[in-house]
Amino acid sequence: MKRPHPRRYAAVALAVAAATAAFVPLSAEAGQQAGLVESVTDTLLAERGPVVAAQRGVAALAREAVVEPRRSVSEWSFGAATIPGDANDHAPDASLYVAHRVAGRWQVGVLGSETFVSLTRQAPTSVVSAEEKALFKQNRAAAGPGAAARSVETGLALPVNASSSVGWGGGPHANDGQGSLYSSLDFGGSGTQIRAAAAGKIYRACVDANSNQTALILIVHANGYTTGYYHLNQRSGFPADGTSVDLGYSLGTAGTNTVCGGSANGAHVHFTLRSGDRNNLAFESVIGKTIGGWTFHTNGSNYDGYATHGTSKVQDGGTLYNYGRYAGSGPYAGTVNSSNGANVRSGTNSASSTVMYTAPNGRALAISCKTTGSTVNNSNVWYRLTDTDYVAAALTSTAATIPNC
C-alpha cells in the first residue's frame, strides 16, 4: 500500500504469502512432532484468521502459516507462529504458540489466550521456563478483559535511544494499513538504532530456528502489553528466544527488511502495540495512548495523525523527543539548568547510582515526582523522571508544583 505523503514510509506487506513452514530436528523427536505444524496452523487461523481476513478485505485466508518450533521435547512444543503478509499490501501477523499432544492429538494455545497460559503452566521447564510461565500469566492478567484499553499511559518508551529525537513517518495506522484499529506507528530512518520500549522477554518470528539474526520481533511485557518490531536490518548474535531484555535493549537498526513479506519504501521500524488479552483481538489501538511521553491521535484515516505532549503538538512526518516510559504522576515539564549539564542516574545516590546519561544544559525533562537523596548544591531533593531515572533538583528548573513520589 502506497501513501501520498512523500515523507511517510510504507510499513505494510506488499508480497510473499509464505508457505506453511517449520524446522524440526532430525531425531527421534521429529516423529513425535507429526501433525504439529498442521495443528498450530489450524489453531492460529481459527483465532486470528477472521480478524486478519477482515482487515484484508477477504472472506477467508488461505490455509498457510509460518510455524517455527523453538523448543520441543517428547509431546510438547513451543515457538513462533505467523500469518504471513500477502501480495495486496498486508503485513504479517506474528504470535507465539504452545502445544501438547494428548492421545495423538495436539492441543494448541496462542499467545493471549487462556489456553496458552494454561498450557505453558503445565509444560516442562525445558520447553517453557519458570520465568516465562510467570510472565505469560502476568501479561494476560495485567491486560484482563479490556483493562489495557482503559489505560492511557502504556508505561512504554518510544523504541529509540533515551532522551533523543526520532522522526515518525507513519502516523497511527492498522497493522495491515487499512481498517480502523490503529495499532501501529512508524519510526526512524536509515541508521536509527531501534530499542526495546520496555523490559520484557524477547521472541523472534519468521526466521529459521537455527538463525541467530534479527527478524520480526515480539517483546512480551509484564504490564499486559506485547510490542512488535518489523523491518529491522539483520543483526547477528541475537539472543535466544525467551531472553530477558531491559528497557532500551538494542534490537538493530531501522531498515527495509521484509523477511515475512511486505515492502518498505524507506528505512523504519513498524512498531505495533498488542494486548495480552485475546478478547482484545491481540492488537491494541494506540489512539489516546501515551508512549514515550506522547499521546497519539488520528485525523480520521490510516497514517494521518498527530501526537501531543503537554502543549506541544507534532503532526506525523515530524520529530518526537523520547521522554521515556511513564512511572507516576505528571509528566511535568522541566529543564536542565546547569552549564555543565546534569547526570541522570538510576537512583538518588550521587556516589553509587549509575549515570544513565548526561543531559546537557537546556535539555527538556519529563518529571514524574520528587523524593530525597544525596545533597547536590545544598539541596537533597531529586526528581524522578517518567523513565524512572533520577536527576538532582538543584540542576534543573520547573514551573510546576511537583508531588512527592
Image (tube, rainbow, N blue to C red):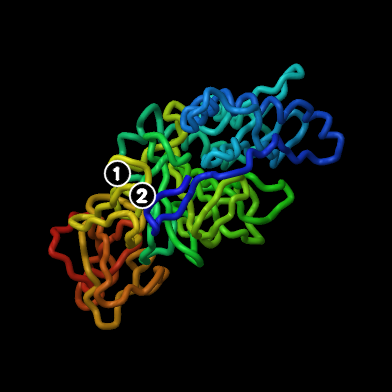
Which one is in front, 297 or 222?
297
- Real-space Cα separation, disc 2 to disc 1, in angstroms: 8 Å
Work out which residue is located at the far bottom of the displayed protein and give it. Answer: 339
Is mark 2 in CB contact (under 8 Å) with mark 1? yes
Which one is in front, 161 or 317?
317
Residue identifier under label 1: 298
Write down the quadrant of residue 182 in the picture: top left
Tell me the kind of residue under disc 1. Answer: Thr
* Dot 2 alpha-carbon crowd within 10 angstroms: few under 14, some 14 to 19, many 20 or more: many
- Give the structural element (helix, strand or loop) at label 1: strand
Q: Is residue 126 visible?
A: no
Tell me the kind of residue under disc 2. Answer: Gly
Residue identifier under label 2: 171
**Mark identifier at residue 354:** none
* Dot 1 alpha-carbon crowd within 10 angstroms: few under 14, some 14 to 19, many 20 or more: many
User: Relative to 254, is 376 above or below?
Assistant: below
Q: Residue at x 36, y 29 (%)?
A: 146
Which one is in front, 125 or 262?
262
